[in-house]
Amino acid sequence: MRSERWLPRGFLILLLAVLAVAGWQWRQGAPLSANLMALVPGDAPDALQLRAEQRMQEPLNREMLVLVGSADGQQAINMAQQLGEQWQASGLFEQVQWNLQADLPALREQLLRGRLAMLSAADREQLIAHPDAFIEQRVQALFDPFTGFSLVPSQDDWLGLTGRIQNSQPQRGAVQLDIGSGALMAHADGKQWVLLRARTQGNAFDLTLPMQVAALLEQSRAQAATQQVELLAASGLLYAASGQQQASREITWVGGGATVGILLLLLLAFRRWRVLLAFVPVLVGMLFGAVACVAFFGSMHVMTLVLGSSLIGVAVDYPLHYLSKSWSLKPWRSWPALRLTLPGLSLSLATSCIGYLALAFTPFPALTQIAIFSAAGLVGAYLSAVCLLPALLNGVVLRPAQWPLNVAQCLLNARHALLKKVPTPALLALLLMFCAAGLWQLNSKNDIRQWVSAPPQLMTQAQAIARITGYQPTSQFFLVRADSEQQLLERQASLSERLDALIGKGTLQGYLALNQLVSPPREQQRLRAALNALPRHWQPLLALGVPLPALQNELAQLQALPEQRIDAALNGPLA
């Protein structure tokens, strides 16, 4: 018939077109995603919220914190330096830092420029409302050598504003600077720990980088163990590497197991090597599903591959429909067998697609992506089974094994025997009771964390790092919006008061905010105006021996300081 000639040719043209689209989609690498947040339901965030989320997630996705621990502090420092040099040379990291490389001149310059803008709210209020107490504290600080270290020498800052700014910066954790080496160190569990911080070239959602970083870490851990040095590491990259390994295992077991089982079933049942061509619709279905996913969503999540691997069993069902006619159709021919089963195949496709596409209208992006993948894959498998596979099997003579019929007959005999002993209403009642018992146990738990199996060893190390350093990485944030810088900083200050109350209750460990770095323009103007009254109160400094011209010159410098904006504060090293 004419359809037997043009159907395979037409499908091959379609298949070549889909392959061309797939090649174009993969032109810059595999369009796969491992970002679990892409599967989270919810309304699409606006552009500003999305930028804020990306900014907060970036350190967790690109940075790795490592503690190098040894009973001998110098040995820990040496190992941290050695690992830092090796990691930097690996090409995986943009920056590896094992010691503090602060630009002290730039820090001093920012402190001097921000003496009015960066003064804390408490110090600012004291200088405005109680200048006598402010000057008295400065005199005591000049007399007491144990009040702390200031980056700016006294002759450049007689009023001590930079020292107050320096001491008012948020300081959390138990990490201290080792002056001799510049390393950041902590002491816990009878060991000295050196903090090593590495920033990767890519992020945790890269398909190859997490595995490379995890492998390098294991090599470094083995190297350190030879010198009795312990490594603790925490990073989103390590969780991503573990997730990729788990996904790979699941794809291998689910997809590989299903494939092997289907191939064995085909060979044992039909006893012809060419019947393995029945697996072609499965491959075509996976291709159609992947292309459709990338076309709709821009990329395909690895979770879709894991869950979509169940498509294999459904897609291979189409060729099995007309291959099974070989037990009753003598002689069996592919095209006549297809015509006999085509209505059933079409109905099966329609019902399956309706079921899958119903998932596409749920608010859960993971189910939507799986629905598109599965529906498109089934359409591709159906077209392959109807248009191409009969031509590939043309001329095959099937003499199927009889054991499947024997097994089916035994099952039918068992069914008839059961119905003779137990009436149908009783069986229906038992079935309803069984279903009711299952429904009674049913409960829902809408927690996406169930999709993620965090390795206990990674969780243990992350908790140990948080305990030793006193620092717990987080991606929680408040997004404050305003019409002006003045309003923005005022709103942040109001929020800070509420957060400070939580810190006082022990509910919150700490936070970082812009208003800790720069004060509102109105407050800067208010402080500048209060400086005019300062000469009436600096007699204790004069009595201490501070030259009057030096104080007058410093006062003039302070009054001449320009109003500092947020951008200028963020461009400094303290930011």
Image (cartoon, rainbow, N blue to C red):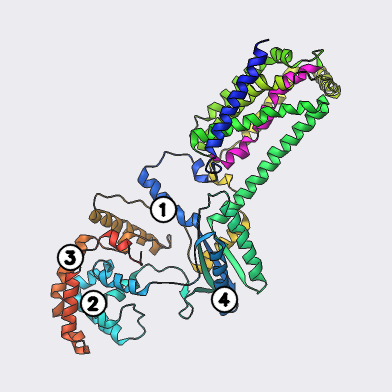
Can the viewer see residue 203? Answer: yes
* Left or right of residue 530: residue 236: right
Distance between the alpha carbons at the discs numbered 1 and 2: 39 Å
Instruction: Return the disc, 4 or 2, that comes first in the chain's sequence.
Output: 4
Question: The C terminus appears in which quarter of the rendering?
Answer: bottom left
Which label lies toward us, 3 or 1?
1
Rendered location of residue 220, percent (x, y): 62, 66
Q: Is residue 176 left or right of residue 517?
A: right
User: Which residue carries the number 2 mark?
Assistant: 134
In three-dimensional space, the C-alpha distance between marks 3 and 1, rounded to whole angstroms, equals 33 Å
Q: Position of residue 430 (x, y in %)?
A: 72, 25
Marks 1 and 2, the one that precedes in the sequence: 1
Q: What mark, if any, has residue 55 been given in the picture?
A: 1
Q: CA distance from mark 1 to mark 4?
A: 33 Å
Q: Position of residue 198 (x, y in %)?
A: 51, 63
Q: Is residue 260 above or below residue 48?
A: above
Which residue in the structure is indicated by mark 4?
Answer: 78
